[in-house]
């Protein structure tokens, strides 16, 4: 069966999305254009330590180290105003923050779409495999000018 035939036969519904997202081993966090978390899957709950009732409706900066909040805000504002981004469509290693405050590196693949006249962002990612070098880079990290992590997500549980 050709890929086009398969895609046409899949039931593309909200139920299908949630079934796929909830069984995905990587963390998925979705945020709206105001930077509020609108969805996180089970892997994101395990990774970041926030159950849905503590994360939904809260700012995405909940999952971002404090030193990156301004860059995140500026990047989001720039994207909404101009449609340009330094992160969308790329995979980058960035620091994330768990509920207990511990930072850990994640590989973030950021995407966006528009629906009902609003912008949304998705950031499935996994815990970075680069180990000790990542820990050193996290300490030395400077804010990335386009860092609007509109869904930082990390697949497996990060190292503690």
Image (cartoon, grey):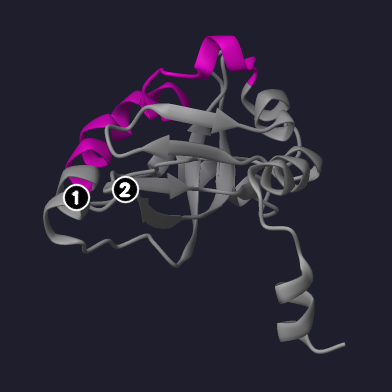
Which label sits on residue 80? 1
- Provide the secondary structure element on which disc 1 rests: helix
- Mark 2 vs mark 1: which is more N-terminal? 1
Q: Residues within 10 Å of mark 2 (few under 14, many from 20)?
A: some
* Number of marks: 2
Q: Nearer the viewer, residue 13 or 159?
A: 13
Rendered residue at 17%/42% (across/down): 74
Give the answer, above or below, for where 107 lies relative to 40. below
Q: Nearer the viewer, residue 102 or 31?
A: 31
141 on left or right of 104: left
Q: Is 138 part of what is drawn in magenta? A: no
Residue at which label 2 appears:
119
Q: Which residues are magenta?
A: 49-75
Rendered residue at 60%/31% (across/down): 40
Marks 2 and 1 in Cβ contact (< 8 Å)? yes
Q: CA distance from mark 2 to mark 1?
A: 8 Å
């Amino acid at each position: 069966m050709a890929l086009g035939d398969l895609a046409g036969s899949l039931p593309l519904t909200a139920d299908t999305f949630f079934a796929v997202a909830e069984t995905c081993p990587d963390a998925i966090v979705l945020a709206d254009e105001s930077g509020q978390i609108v969805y996180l899957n089970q892997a994101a709950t395990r990774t970041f330590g926030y159950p849905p009732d503590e994360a939904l409706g809260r700012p995405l900066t909940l999952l971002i180290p404090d030193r990156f909040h301004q860059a995140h805000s500026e990047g989001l504002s720039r994207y909404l105003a101009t449609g340009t981004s330094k992160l969308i469509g790329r995979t980058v290693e960035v620091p994330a923050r768990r509920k207990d405050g511990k930072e850990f590196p994640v590989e973030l693949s950021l995407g966006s779409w528009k629906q009902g006249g609003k912008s949304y962002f998705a950031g499935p990612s996994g815990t970075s495999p680069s180990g000790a070098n990542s820990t050193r880079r996290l300490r030395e990290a400077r804010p990335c000018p386009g860092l609007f992590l509109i869904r930082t997500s990390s697949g497996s549980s990060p190292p503690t």
